C-alpha cells in the first residue's frame, strides 16, 4: 500500500543508509550487525585459533598470501606477538566498486599461560597457515608419586 521509499536501486536513501551504518560501526564497532560465529571484529587480521593441551599451546595463524619470512614472531613476558605486512597489488587504472580484502601492516598479540617455556617455541608454515607451538615447562606437569 505505501511502497518502499528506497525501491530504486542505488537511490540516494540507500546511500545515506550505507553511510549511516559505516559511521555507526566506526564509532561503536559492529555491535548492531548480525555478524555470526565466523565474523571477526574490524582490524582482526589474520584470523587465529589457539589450542591449549597438557603439553603445548598451539597458535594457528591463517595468513594466505603472506611471505612467512616477512613475519616477525616474538615472545616476551608470556605475550606472543605476531607482526607482518600483507601487500595487495592494486590496478591503478581500474575503478573499485567494492574492496573487502585489505592490505597493510598487522599485529596480533596473544597472552600465553604462565607455565609455558619461552625457550621451547617453534613455528611452521604450510599452505598459508602459520603454526606456532609453545611447549609447557616440565616442572608444571603433574607428576605421579608412587607409594612404597
Image (tube, helix red, strand yellow):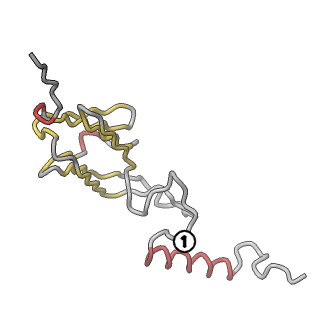
Callout count: 1
The correct choice, above or below, for 46 with respect to 5 in the image is: above
The image quadrant of residue 105 is bottom left
Viewport quadrant of the N terminus: bottom right
Q: Is residue 123 left or right of residue 119?
A: right
Viewport quadrant of the C terminus: top left
Q: Write the residue at 30% across / 56% down.
A: 106
Q: Nearer the viewer, residue 126 or 85?
A: 126
The image quadrant of residue 29 is bottom left
Q: Position of residue 67 (x, y in %)?
A: 31, 41
Q: Is residue 63 visible?
A: no
In the structure shown, which secondary structural element does the residue marked by tag 1 occupy?
Answer: loop
Q: Write the residue at 25% across / 49% down.
A: 82
Q: Position of residue 140 (x, y in %)?
A: 14, 36
Residue lying farthest to the top in this orientation: 148
Residue lying farthest to the right in this orientation: 1
10 Å crowding of disc 1: few (<14), some (14-19), many (20+):
few
Q: Is residue 145 visible?
A: yes
The correct choice, above or below, for 115 with respect to 87 in the image is: above
Q: Write the residue at 13% across / 35% down.
A: 137
Q: Is residue 28 left or right of residue 52?
A: right
Where does label 1 land, which residue?
Answer: 32
Q: Is residue 21 left or right of residue 105?
A: right
Q: Write the residue at 11% across / 19% down.
A: 147
Q: Position of residue 75 (x, y in %)?
A: 15, 47
Q: Position of residue 49 (x, y in %)?
A: 37, 44
Amino acid at each position: 500500500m505505501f511502497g518502499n521509499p528506497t525501491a530504486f536501486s542505488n537511490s540516494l536513501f540507500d546511500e545515506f543508509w550505507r553511510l549511516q551504518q559505516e559511521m555507526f560501526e566506526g564509532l561503536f564497532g559492529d555491535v548492531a550487525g548480525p555478524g555470526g560465529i565466523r565474523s571477526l571484529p574490524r582490524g582482526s587480521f589474520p584470523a587465529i585459533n589457539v589450542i591449549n593441551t597438557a603439553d603445548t599451546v598451539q597458535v594457528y595463524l591463517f595468513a594466505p598470501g603472506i611471505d612467512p619470512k616477512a613475519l616477525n614472531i616474538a615472545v616476551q613476558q608470556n605475550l606472543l606477538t605476531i607482526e607482518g605486512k600483507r601487500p595487495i597489488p592494486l590496478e591503478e587504472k581500474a575503478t573499485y566498486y567494492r574492496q573487502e580484502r585489505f592490505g597493510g601492516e598487522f599485529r596480533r598479540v596473544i597472552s600465553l599461560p604462565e607455565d609455558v617455556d619461552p625457550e621451547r617455541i617453534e613455528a611452521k608454515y604450510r599452505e598459508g597457515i602459520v603454526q606456532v607451538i609453545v611447549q609447557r615447562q616440565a616442572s608444571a606437569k603433574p607428576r605421579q608419586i608412587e607409594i612404597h
